[in-house]
Image: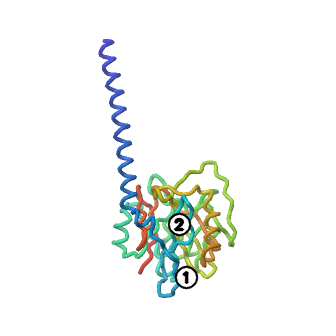
């Protein structure tokens, strides 16, 4: 009897070891896929110069770099080019979403629950999918009105063509917001911002060596402030979107793909 128990225990240990080895290998394979397919080494080192020409209303730009992070953004002058869609049910990958919706650029949206529901206010094509909630973390709203006015604020928009609740707010009235977080970690960051001239700026921040990682959330307000100092963007308000493995940022120059499905996305039309 003891011999049988010993054999069963030994077999259980072997199965656990095998499980952890397979899980580790699968995680490494997915990470390598994101690095190799999402952002090539050529893309990571390729300089991207700011272009303020009116003939290119949605240029990918980069003017801020550090030894660890690469920052890329898209400036959108014509807000009619921006559409906002859900992907909670379909769970399509970002490359398919670009093709299916004829997007020049794609940027992942806000946070969602494990059940695949948006957290807080969600308006797409003027239709309210989800209502706003009270939250100290998701404390802001990004919206574009029917008449083309962009707003990034802590106040719920009365009406909008598109709107998303997310957070935390990173900059307000051209002043960075200090963040005090109980838990903070290195992760790719996606930010949406509005400017002095009623333009929209989507920003991606990530590590050169691993595009799934990036700055701590508490670092992001200072990075945006630095971007303002070294560019002509004139960002006035900015808010954090979902980042890390649930984020995607696809342009004609840089392609940061997700490891896990994105719940929603901004589609910038040609």
Q: Do the residues labelled 2 and 1 touch (CB within 8 Å)?
A: no
x and y percentages locating residue 176 in the rendered image: 68, 66
The residue to which callout 1 is attached is 148
Residue at position x 54%, y 58% in the image:
68
x and y percentages locating residue 135 in the rendered image: 62, 57
Q: Residue 71 carries which label?
A: 2
* Side of 99 where 241 appears, left or right: right
Residue 91 falls in image quadrant: bottom left
Name the foreground residue: 171 vs 163: 171
Quadrant, the C terminus: bottom left
Q: In this view, does 107 lie above or below 2?
A: below
Residue at position x 49%, y 83% in the image:
57
Name the foreground residue: 203 vs 199: 203
- Around disc 1, counting alpha carbons within 10 Å, would you say few (fewer than 14), some (14 to 19), or many (20 or more)? some
x and y percentages locating residue 233 in the rendered image: 60, 77
Please report whichever mark, 2 or 1, sits nearer to the chain's N-terminal start: 2
């Amino acid at each position: 009897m003891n011999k049988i128990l010993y054999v069963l225990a030994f077999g259980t240990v072997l199965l656990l070891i095998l499980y952890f080895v397979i899980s580790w290998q699968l995680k490494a394979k997915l990470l390598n896929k994101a690095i190799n397919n999402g952002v090539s080494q050529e893309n990571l080192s390729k300089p991207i110069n700011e272009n303020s020409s009116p003939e290119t209303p949605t240029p990918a730009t980069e003017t801020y770099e550090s030894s660890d992070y690469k920052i890329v953004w898209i400036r959108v002058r014509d807000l009619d080019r921006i559409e906002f869609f859900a992907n909670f049910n379909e769970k399509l990958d970002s490359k398919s979403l670009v093709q299916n919706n004829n997007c020049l650029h794609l940027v992942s949206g806000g946070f969602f629950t494990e059940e695949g529901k948006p957290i807080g206010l969600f308006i797409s094509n003027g239709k309210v999918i989800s209502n706003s909630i009270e939250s100290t973390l998701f404390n802001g709203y990004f919206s574009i009105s029917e008449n083309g006015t962009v707003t990034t604020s802590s106040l719920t928009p009365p009406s909008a063509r598109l709107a998303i609740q997310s957070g935390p707010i990173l900059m307000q009235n051209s002043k960075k917001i200090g963040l005090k977080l109980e838990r903070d970690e290195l992760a790719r960051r996606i930010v949406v911002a509005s400017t002095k001239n009623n333009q929209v700026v989507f920003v991606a921040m990530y590590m050169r060596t691993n595009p799934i990682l990036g700055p701590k959330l508490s670092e992001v307000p200072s990075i945006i402030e630095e971007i303002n100092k070294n560019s002509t963007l004139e960002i006035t308000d900015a808010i954090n979107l979902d980042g890390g493995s649930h984020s995607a940022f696809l342009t004609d120059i840089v392609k940061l793909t997700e490891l896990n499905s994105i719940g929603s996305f901004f589609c910038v039309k040609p």
